[in-house]
Image (cartoon, grey):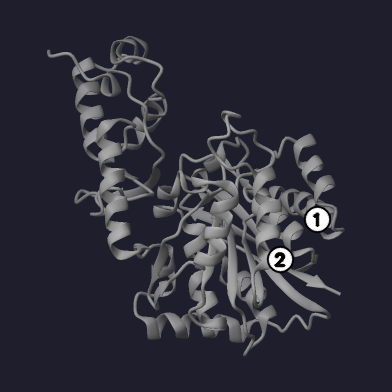
Amino acid sequence: MEPLPEHRDRPHIRPFTPIGVQNAEKKVLVALRDPANLRGDGNSPVVPPEWLPLLSLLQGERSLDDLAEGTGAPKEFLVQLVSVLDEAGLLWGPNSERLEREAMARVAAANAFPLGASIAAGEDPVAAKAFIADLLAKADDPELEGELLGIVAPHLDYGRGGPTYAAAYKSFGTGAKVDRIVILGTNHFGSGDGVVMSRFGFQTPFGIFNADLAVVDALGALLGARLFKDEIDHLGEHSIQIQLPWIHEVFGNVPIVAALVPSPLVPMLADDGARVSYDEFVPALRAVLAEAPGRTLFVSSADLSHVGPQFGDETPIGSEIRKQVEAYDRSLLAVFLEGDEELFIKKLMNDQNHQRWCSVGNMTAAKIVTGGMPELLEYSQGPLESEAGANALVTSAALAFVRI
């Protein structure tokens, strides 16, 4: 057997999303979906579910010989497996780097990231508009007092989170005028551990939402090219794109400032200045927006707790677990609503973020930059059901940032 390239002999698997599928014989398999879809064809390797523990061992630390000895899997099988993963772009290495370059070249040619999570409203613009409008019509008017500066809305799928999105976006009313919307998202699958921005827009069923280049370039002037270092992370990230159909329904096609914001709870992998930290970004964004003409509104794209076996918990999700999750969520929200983001962050750190709030960074950044007081509009829980019951629970909330 010829010597393998280093990246295949010590394979390090890239992030993937496991999707349950069935073959022609009705056998349950798992498709390994690349969130970034680097190949651009939507095709995914398919494996038996019992292979997932083996895939979790591919962290670049063990050779195939070590893996064969430790797992009992034949080396010939492992060679074939990593070959398939590599060709799919699911291994870190030369092939995934080439696919990244090709993917970003397509983005540059279109001046926009391709159609992604915004398609959740519907690929046809008329149907997508009607879908969002119907949800908004069913939401109650929050009747806020004071100047609305922004909202917190879920980035959960519309099936579970639709009414909570509507509760948040209903705050804006109708006919409001805005010059730009800042969307702060969460980097779920990308490699960047700092703030990630891009000068490219986002394709949607309603056309391209372009970046407000005056604001983005002003931030780039302050923070440097490192602000755009990991912009490919936007390719597979849904937390920005999932908001665009709602923005289109309320405001039309307006310029946006999109940033993926890391959690202040998690230290950066290397404190070498190569990426923009949370602490650098927040005051820079506040300073740039203070000089930007016109009206700016914020959307913090945030989910709260992630609990259940799918996220590594042993206890199945039942009514008692859901009550405990809600009680803890509301205790954290109470601290956030008091307006003390430092105490909010400290509490999460002290509690080791045991319910996995995933958007602490963008929620607190929106609170600080807007200077508004948050008001809770709606709290919801979205269980993910299977034949065995709920094995995952994601919670979310609709909030408004208001200046009294």
Q: Quadrant of residue 166?
A: bottom right
Label 2, secondary structure: give it.
helix
What amino acid type is highlighted by mark number 1?
Answer: Phe
Quadrant position of the C terminus in the picture: bottom right
Q: Residues within 10 Å of mark 1 (few under 14, many from 20)?
A: many
Considering only vertical position in the picture, is 273 above or below 173?
above
The residue sitting at 37% across, 75% down in the picture is 205
* Image-based side of 354 in relation to 346, left or right: left
Counting from the top left corner in percent of width and height, residue 109 is at 27, 61
Q: Is residue 398 visible?
A: no
- The residue closer to the viewer here, 202 or 174, is 202
Quadrant position of the N terminus in the picture: top left
- The residue closer to the viewer here, 150 or 375, is 150
Label 1, secondary structure: give it.
helix
The residue sitting at 81% across, 40% down in the picture is 346
According to the picture, the residue beneath numbered tag 2 turns out to be 290
Counting from the top left corner in percent of width and height, residue 188 is at 51, 47
Among the two numbered marks 1 and 2 on one chain, the one whose residue lies closer to the N terminus: 2
- The residue closer to the viewer here, 202 or 314, is 202
Whole-Å distance between the Cαs marked 1 and 2?
Answer: 24 Å
The residue sitting at 32% across, 14% down in the picture is 63
Q: CB atoms at circles 1 and 2 under 8 Å apart?
A: no
* Image-based side of 243 in relation to 107, left or right: right
Counting from the top left corner in percent of width and height, residue 314 is at 60, 35
- Between circles 1 and 2, the one closer to the viewer is 2
According to the picture, the residue beneath numbered tag 1 turns out to be 336
* Image-based side of 40 in relation to 135, left or right: left
Q: In which quarter of the image is residue 75?
A: top left
Q: How crowded is mark 2: few (under 14 residues within 10 Å), some or many (20 or more)?
A: few
Counting from the top left corner in percent of width and height, residue 33 is at 34, 47
